Structure formats: C-alpha cells, structure tokens
Amino acid sequence: MIPDERPIGFASATYATTRPGVAEETLKTDTIQIERKTFVFALKENPRGRFLRITEDVNGRRDTIIIPAPGLEDFKKILDLMIQASGGSEAKAE
C-alpha cells in the first residue's frame, strides 16, 4: 500500500476523532424533535469565536453543521425565505 493510500472502508470521520480538542464553552443549548429526528442547537464559544453547532440525530446517526456567529443573520434570512416558500409563514420576505 502507498503510504498516503487509505484502506477500503476508511471513514473520514476518523479525522474528527484524532484531532486534538479545542476548549469550547457552551453558552446556550436547545433541542427539538421533528418526526423521527432530534435536532440539538448549541451556541458555543472557543478561542476563535462564537458559533452555532446544529446536530441532527436519527437513530444514533449524527450529522453536524457549524455556523460562525457572524453568519447567523444571513442564515436566518435564508431560513425565513425557505419557511415562506414552504407555505409555513404568512410573513412577507424583505
């Protein structure tokens, strides 16, 4: 095997478990259940700044996205537009 080659079945998630941890402080968390999915919203802070971590848990399988705090307003605007497009809100988009 070539040194940079990965064995078949090598999961990229392994990288996340081998990286050294960065100290994070949890500022606020909230959880919602939608159908069979659980979403955990955690506002956190580390030496690089504040961020929102959104974790989706479906029967033990977890996927996470992280949104840096400076992008939260833009994220909210897009989310509001998606809610309006889905028919879930009577509010007009700006």
Image (cartoon, grey):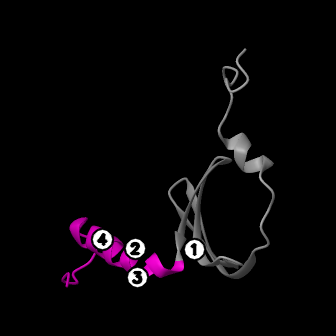
For the residues marked 1 and 4, what is the alpha-carbon distance in whole angstroms?
20 Å
The residue at the point 71 percent across, 49 percent down is: 16
For the residues marked 3 and 2, what is the alpha-carbon distance in whole angstroms?
5 Å
Residue underneath mark 2 = 75
Residue 65, by quadrant, is bottom right
Circle 1: residue type: Leu
For the residues marked 1 and 2, what is the alpha-carbon distance in whole angstroms?
11 Å
Q: Secondary structure at mark 2?
A: helix
For the residues marked 4 and 2, what is the alpha-carbon distance in whole angstroms?
12 Å
Tell whether position 72 is magenta.
Answer: yes
Q: Which mark is residue 20?
A: none
Image coordinates for residue 71, horizontal then vertical, percent: 44, 76
Circle 2: residue type: Phe
Residue count near mark 3 (Cα–Cα under 10 Å), binned few <14, some 14–19, many ≥20? few
Q: Secondary structure at mark 3?
A: helix
Look at the numbered discs 1 and 4 and tell me whether their residues touch, using CB distance below 8 Å.
no
Image coordinates for residue 29, horizontal then vertical, percent: 66, 78
From the viewer's perspective, is the residue at label 4 or at label 3 nearer? Answer: 3
Look at the numbered discs 3 and 2 and tell me whether their residues touch, using CB distance below 8 Å.
yes
Magenta span of residues: 69-94
Q: Quadrant of the N terminus?
A: top right
Question: Sequence order check: which comes first, mark 1 or mark 4?
Answer: 1
Predominant secondary structure, magenta span: helix
Residue underneath mark 4 = 83
Q: Which mark is residue 73?
A: 3
From the viewer's perspective, is the residue at label 1 or at label 4 nearer? Answer: 1
Question: Sequence order check: which comes first, mark 3 or mark 1?
Answer: 1
Residue count near mark 1 (Cα–Cα under 10 Å), binned few <14, some 14–19, many ≥20? many
For the residues marked 4 and 3, what is the alpha-carbon distance in whole angstroms?
15 Å
Q: Quadrant of the C terminus?
A: bottom left
Residue that lies at the very extreme toward the top in this rendered image: 1
